[in-house]
Amino acid sequence: MECQDELGYRLELDQPPRRIVSLVPSLTQTLFALGLGGQMVGVTRFCVEPAGAVDSIQKVGGTKNPDLRAIAALEPDLVIANAEENRRQDVERMRARGLRVFVTYPRTVSGALESILGLGRVTHREAEAAVLAREVVRVVSVIETSLGIWNKLRLRVFCPIWKKPWMTFNGDTYAHDVLRLLGFMNIFADSAERYPRTTLQEVLDLRPQVVLLPDEPYTFGEADLAELKAELPSGLSRRIMLISGRDLHWYGARMITGLPVLAERLGRLRASLTPAG
């Protein structure tokens, strides 16, 4: 069977893969959801879900610095990668070693659905992937229906992914589309760079009404929240919320639980604000 990944690369799989290495934490969880836990032979040290189930699987480095020799030694039938989380040169080196690598690249919620279906095709788990995708569609539909007026009257949000320097994301990213789905407008949507660097003054010039601090990829915590509150105008300083980075950034199986949790938390925040901000 010939499959095409999300960057257009074609790979041949004559039979269902029996040995899989995943270099994408959210897709490791998704592969388990497709019933492929028994085929997983290697994951990154950041692959922590499903909790407990991944503990005994060999770790092959990080997402940006995988141990290519260790991966090759596992003799996988299939390696799962992502165009953003993993480096192109690592993917090319694995392919040069004769490994089959399937690369995902979702940048929207609907794109994440296509990634689930693509994983189902390449792993011969199409029926399971279709069930998973339908559940995500149901979750998304419930969220969209519950938004009401907020589907049009969107609050302006700043959501950094790093500090020192401050970094965020533009409109060509999955996280942006999640915020859109949840009724918010990313103030850096129109940035020319996908992951622009910025300053707090530039942020304030764009008039955010809400600030969200996820704990991935930078681990924003209570100390960061307190520090930022002291630097922002009093009105905005009361509208900062710590959120789960997995709920925001992880696509695949996590969407089923993560998106409703994030929608509920942000809904409570929104309910405490006036539309005028």
Image (tube, helix red, strand yellow):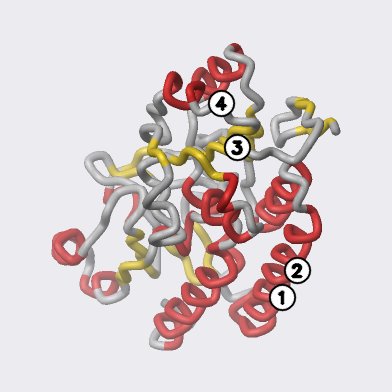
In this figure, which residue is indicated by the disc labeled 2?
134
Q: In this view, does 266 lie above or below 219?
A: below
In this figure, which residue is indicated by the disc labeled 4?
75
At label 4, counting other C-alpha atoms closer than 10 Å, the crowd grade (few under 14, some 14-19, many 20 or more) is some
Q: Where is residue 182 in the image (x, y as percent from the top left)?
A: 56, 71
Q: How far apart are marks 4 and 3 (CA)?
A: 7 Å
Q: Is residue 37 above or below residue 277?
A: above
Q: Is residue 13 visible?
A: yes
In this figure, which residue is indicated by the disc labeled 1?
138
Query: Which residue shows up at 38% across the image and 64% down it?
Result: 244
Taking 104 as reference, is 205 left or right?
left
Lower position in the chain sequence, tag 4 or tag 3 = 3
In this figure, which residue is indicated by the disc labeled 3?
19
What amino acid type is highlighted by mark number 1? Answer: Arg
Q: Position of residue 180 (x, y in %)?
A: 58, 63
What amino acid type is highlighted by mark number 3? Answer: Arg
Residue closest to the eye, 120 or 114: 120
Describe the element under mark 4 as helix, strand or loop: loop
Q: In this view, does 117 lie above or below 92?
A: below
Q: Which of marks 2 and 3 is in front?
A: 3
